[in-house]
Structures are given as structure tokens and as C-alpha cells.
Image: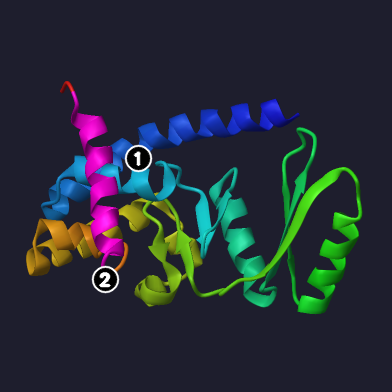
Amino acid sequence: MRRTIMAGLVLVASISAANAESVFESAGELYGVDPTLLRSISMTESSVYPWTLNFGGNAFYLPDREAMVRTFKASRSRPWLVTVVYRDKRPSRRIFFKHGDDASAFGLRKRADRAVRSAKVVHIDIDNVDIGLMQVNWRWHGKEFSSIDQMSQTHANVMYAAQMLRSQIKQYGLFRGVGYYHSRSSPRWRHYYRKVRRSYASLTNGS
């Protein structure tokens, strides 16, 4: 079952990556940004997988856009997340809860199950969530979109990221402009720039 799920995600990822290429090209041409740089950032952010949500380090790779939107909406009223990891090959489970007491009780029950390796309970910041192919942050950029439905669309997600990246590079230069896509604090932006640079090199090596 796990192999079937993983194979399905790999297939979707390969198709999605192929579809994303045309969007990178279009966004790059429109905003004057190197399309390979956009893809490098996407590799760093989401592994070029468009149906990705990340709640402060808790990443979700969903099977399609509808599932991503449903997961995002579910989190709005249920900010407690329990991640259950099993000892066998079953995929881990993630369940949102409205109240911390309910999440803690569920986690405690699961940890008592010998089939469970761990049941981690965390309170997530429901606004600090990165969305889609380019992992655009909801807190800082959500207001620029009409809704999560628009923000989760690959074309809109990449176009907005390209526009933002162009503005930052123009204002701060390439080094800081790319680093600031992730964070304005040092050394985080410097570390991020190096990661993107490695992704870029992997895409252009031998070309």
C-alpha cells in the first residue's frame, strides 16, 4: 500500500514538474527573471511539487490541489496537529484538532499503542504556512490573492513569486534578493542563497 501511494506521488510529481516548466518560462519572460532560477527556488522550496503545504516545518505533500486546499481550510479552525508514525511500513497520519486537550489525549492513546513509534503533538501557527510550488507564505502574501483557491493555482503561485523575486533582486541585488525570498535575517538568507545556488548548479551542470 505504501509503495502504491509513493509511486502515485512520484508519478504526479513528474507530471507536475513537466507542467511547471512552461510556467517558469512564461513567468521568467514576463518579469525578466531567469526561469532556471525560478525552478531552482522551487526545487529548494517544494522539490518542484505543487501540492505542498508547510506549517512552520510540518510539510504536507498532498495528492492534488483540491486536497491541499481542504487541508489548508481544515487547519484554520483546528490549530493542533498530531503526527502519528508507525513502526511498520504504514504511512504516517496527521490529524488536526480544535483543542489542545483533545490533541494531547489522542496522542497519549496512540503512544500507548505498540504499533506506534511516535505521536507528536504540536500547536501550529495557522497563518505561518507556505503554499504551493513556490511556497508563498500566507501570512505575508495571502492578501495579494483573492483566496486560497487562487494562491494554490500553479500559474498564479509562480507568477507572484517571479514578480516578488524580480523586485527584490532589483532592490538588493542577486545575492540578497534570492536570500530574502526565504528570510531577511542573517545567516538564514545567506544559507538559503547557497542552497538555491547548489540547485541551480545541478540544473545547469553539463548544459
Per the image, is 204 magenta? yes
Secondary-structure class at tag 2:
loop
The quarter of the displayed image where residue 55 is located: bottom right
- Amino acid on which disc 1 is placed: Ala
Residue located 63% across and 60% down the image: 71
Q: CA distance from mark 2 to mark 1?
A: 27 Å
Mark sitting on residue 98:
none
- On the rendered structure, is 104 left or right of 193? right
Q: Where is residue 117 drawn, in percent x and y?
A: 79, 46
- Amino acid on which disc 2 is placed: Arg
Position of 23 relative to 184 (above/below): above
Mark 1 lies on residue: 20
Secondary-structure class at tag 1:
helix
Q: Where is residue 180 drawn, in percent x and y?
A: 24, 65
Question: Exactly how many numbered labels are in the figure?
Answer: 2
Viewer-nearest of discs 2 and 1: 2
Residue located 84% across and 73% down the image: 102
Q: Please name whichever residue, 12 or 126, is drawn nearer the observer in this view of the structure.
A: 126
Neighbor class of circle 1 (other Cα within 10 Å; few <14, some 14-19, many 20+) is many
- On the rendered structure, is 83 left or right of 137? right
Per the image, is 40 magenta? no
Position of 148 relative to 28 (above/below): below
Magenta span: 184-205
